[in-house]
Amino acid sequence: MLSRVAAVMAPRTDNRRRVTGSSGRRREGGESEPQRPNMSRHLFTSAVLLLLFVMMCCGTCGAAAAVESKSGVVQLPKWVDIFLPNKTQVVAKNGSAAGTPRDSFVSPSLVSAGGVIAAFAGGRVKYNDPHKSGWLDSSDIVAGYISAAGTWPSIVAEITNNGWKTHTALGGWNGKDHVSVWYWPTAVARDNKVFLIAGGYEWKYNYDYKKWLRDEWDIQLVVGEVTQAKDIKHSKQISWGEPTSLLPQIPQKMKSGLDHFAGTGGSGIVMGNGTLVCPLIAANGNHPVSMITYSTDNGKSWEFPGRTSPADCFYPRITEWENGKLLMVALCGGGRKVFESRDMGKNWTEAIGTLSGVWTKSKSGARWDEGLHVGALITAIVEGRKVMLYTHKASHPLEASEPNALYLWVTDNNRTLQIGPVSEDSVVNKTLDSNLLYSDDALHLLQAKGDRESTAISLARLTDELKTIKSVLRTWAQLDASFSESSTPTAGLVGFLSNTSSGGDTWIDEYRCVDASVTKAAKVKNGFKFTGPGSMATWHVNSREDNRQYSFVNHRFTLVATVTIHQVPKGSTPLLGAGLGDGHGAKIIGLSCGMNKTWETVFDGKKTTSNTTWELGKEHQVALMLQDGNKGSVYVDGVIVGSPAKIPKVGALGHEITHFYFGGDEGDSDSSVTVTNVFLYNRPLSVGELKMVRKSDGQKKETVTTKKKKKGNGDGKKGKGDGSMRGGISRLLLLLGLGFCASVALY
């Protein structure tokens, strides 16, 4: 295989040495002393004392690890090593003989079948070559089995037992003159069967040439059936059949243009109609491509659609969102993209606006920035709501030396909530890949963590994270219901700034996803009052530094707010707008009020005075709208101000829309403006819909706020904007005081 494709298709590793503790468990966190949160010495001391008190009360019964950084105290899940290098014993396929260890484990995959959770990985080991070549490695696909009904303590006890063994599922048939190498296990399960796909080849020793020669690349399928679903013992729980090559089922026309077909790691899916689907990668000359294979007859035969993703798209993850609609997330040419197919992979098109939090470009400009890839993507029904869960790496919003972290995200394809981090890197121990499984009302995360020489596979049950997700989904449902009663459009509604409990430097998003930061403003009912230059709020809805990525704002959005002007300014005064992340906050779309009581529109930084006027002290509904990435418009009280303006495509400007602003650094020192009830939609609203928002505005203020006070958010807690663990000190103290023992009890 050519060098570029070979580099892509090799299992992901890092070239740093792995560190373990005395028990064999990896230590989380960096080598240097962690930075403490930005809080006063008194409050910090109080938090530490309270933490020590809670620890004494709760004991040391396996609580999640606490990692402290500048962003605050983060409770990480408890992990258990399933595949540990040079320790975990791997038994031969369907055999009972003594096992052998592996040097490293890569490419995790996690499925549930017949009451058994099966974890897979590629197990690599240095081949003891009798021909003294000294460079051969062998790799097989190994599996570990866990009872899906087991409690977390029982699972940990079983895996940490000295008798814990795993099994070879594919490969492992090494001999004096042949060595097998298998990559990228991709599994999908239905009922009590597991379908496992991997790509690989064999080395064979040629005595004539006195050297090892590689056989042709193959892609193979092996099917396993659960035989002991209810009993946790060290004997096998899945019986594996003989592997079969899938190459004969690939159309010749496809094979003439593509080769080196392989799985991708991670998991496949079972569609609503029972179709089994697995993501694949292949090589098109010197370029990797992503594709799928699927089976409509429960794995008896497999179809290979003729179309692939664009060239240089790899690490695909797939899921079904709408009936028959497949989504594929892939790393493409220096950034993440989302594709969709409604014809089972015969055609793939970019799904701009779908999975908005996934779209991004490499900050470094590197074409092969593997840190951007999505580790896991699944669809689940949680609290009666269909959502997608996914993981990917992101940097802390700190200095460059701060370790990266693996984050969990949940989205209903409108709102996106960051849950996490769930794992943090140190300089010598990094998360390289991950996989999610939601079954039996439990959420599990499997990750590969380590370095180039030694990587382990670990499992965590995300109990607290799932509780947070459920709480937030209840909030979403309650808010949507309240808005629907007041005829406010909810289709595409992403965020809502109002919240009478907001104050200080935070404007809380009622949907608990992304808060706005406030500077020099006074809290009023449902919003803030901005007085003079520098009095403003900034809503960072698409900021990678804050791990907030509503990338749809670069293509289409509607921002609706209620604005009241209390004083005639002596000059142009900004009210609200969309700003670029160019370091200067250039305004791409905006609205200002002029000294002659006229509205002033802003497009691509250029201000235009309109012939329409505003009234002093009157509540005006204002709306900013972007369509197709280059058509901007401004509405006041349901009527367009001026004319729609063509603006440069946001992408063509070299910068993205990163935030919305309210108030600003410009204007009259005596200016006074109130902004309340801000709605953000991921689509353009019609004039009729804008009028419905305005018509229901008075009722909305009472209905939503009153109902939230009566109902709460389903768990008796107040929503916190970005869903992360970065709340204020009062919330931190409450979390330490109440949540610590609860999380321990759950484990």
Image: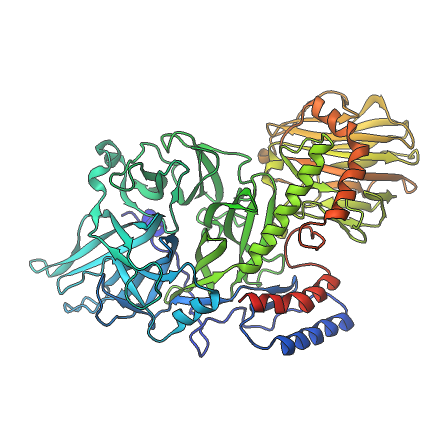
Instruction: Return the residue nearer the eye: 17 or 529.
Output: 529
For this view, does 192 lie left or right of residue 716? left
Residue visible at 35% across and 48% down in the picture: 189
Q: Is residue 732 above or below residue 585?
A: below
For this view, does 388 lie left or right of residue 158? right
For this view, does 47 lie left or right of residue 294? right
Instruction: Return the residue nearer the eye: 81 or 264.
Output: 81
Instruction: Return the residue nearer the eye: 170 or 467.
Output: 467
For this view, does 160 lie left or right of residue 685? left
Residue visible at 61% across and 40% down in the picture: 656
State the image coordinates of residue 179 (x, y, percent, origin top left): 19, 60
State the image coordinates of residue 668 (x, y, percent, origin top left): 89, 39
- The quarter of the picture where residue 632 lies is top right
- View extreme (left): residue: 208
- View extreme (front): residue: 230
* Colour scheme of the picture: rainbow
Query: Is residue 235 visible to us here?
Result: yes
Instruction: Return the residue nearer the eye: 440 or 535.
Output: 440
Q: Is residue 618 above or below residue 12?
A: above
Q: Is residue 299 above or below residue 633?
A: below
Query: Is residue 581 visible to us here?
Result: no
State the image coordinates of residue 54 (x, y, percent, origin top left): 66, 74
Residue visible at 22% across and 68% down in the picture: 96
